[in-house]
Amino acid sequence: MESEKILKVCGSITKKESLALITSNILENTVVAEADMPYSNYYGRIPDKPQPNSLFLFTEGFYTLEEALRLTQNIDICAKNKVNTASAIFLHQGHHIPAIRIRNFPDYQHLKMLQECYIKLGVKFARKVQLEKEAVVTVSKCFFLEDKGDGIFFDKQEKHEGYINLPKRPELSKFEKLMEKVKNNSDCLFFDGAIGGLIIDGKVQDIMRVYSEHLDLKMLTCIKTEVLKWI
């Protein structure tokens, strides 16, 4: 049997994110928000969750992915819980608002402690942030993927996420219209999509991220076929 091909690469995902401010268990004069409707085109509601979703800790300055990873791996609670760290930039009225994105954080009660650890490592948090309820965010992160060939990948850390190669990167507004066409004119199962890019062998490959609790190779192949018809 052919062994699976595993890729450990970096890249980014861009999407509209619905945000809810967190007001308890955080340091005074700091801003923390949570993605309260992750994969909104899939659920259409807030999914049940035993722990926080994606958390955004807004910072004064921008921290690269390398910086965010280095900082977080030096915090015990993050290392022990295998917290997934990323660098994030929100676009709001032409302005870029930086944040550190945290996933797989164990609970809300230790958020203040997490912030204190970052501060000890030199991080400066934003005191005030102007954001709409929904904002466009680009998250730069590391990916651990299984390459199935033909431009199809499965995420080895997020079991409901997969990726397909795109011939070009559409603008976000055009991508949203593309998703409407695919969902209204195909038999592909219900899913949420986002655009992004992977850096593989020193070159950027445009991708679409697919989320579904019924994700499999047949589904990703179906979506890829339909997307290529309309893109």
Image: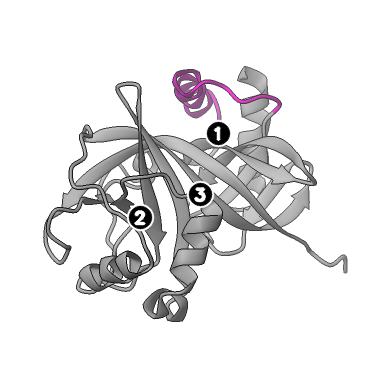
Per the image, label 2 sits on a secondary structure element best described as loop
Q: Does residue 211 sit above or below 168 in this rendering?
A: below
**Residue located at (52% from left, 20% from top):** 171
Provide residue 18's location: percent of width, then percent of height.
28, 40
First in residue order: circle 3 vs circle 1: 3
**Residue located at (84% from left, 67% from top):** 3
Can residue 175 be spotted in the picture? Answer: yes
Q: Which mark is residue 54?
A: 2
Quadrant containing the N terminus is: bottom right
First in residue order: circle 2 vs circle 1: 2
Looking at the image, what colour scheme do you see?
A: one colour
In front of the other: label 3 or label 1? 3
First in residue order: circle 3 vs circle 2: 2
**Structural crowding at the residue carrying mark 2, measured as other residues with C-alpha within 10 Å and reported as few (<14), some (14–19) or many (≥20):** many
Quadrant containing the C terminus is: top right
* Contact flag, marks 3 and 1 (Cβ < 8 Å): no
Q: Does residue 188 sit above or below 108 in this rendering?
A: above
* Highlighted magenta segment, given as a residue range: 167-186
**Structural crowding at the residue carrying mark 1, measured as other residues with C-alpha within 10 Å and reported as few (<14), some (14–19) or many (≥20):** few
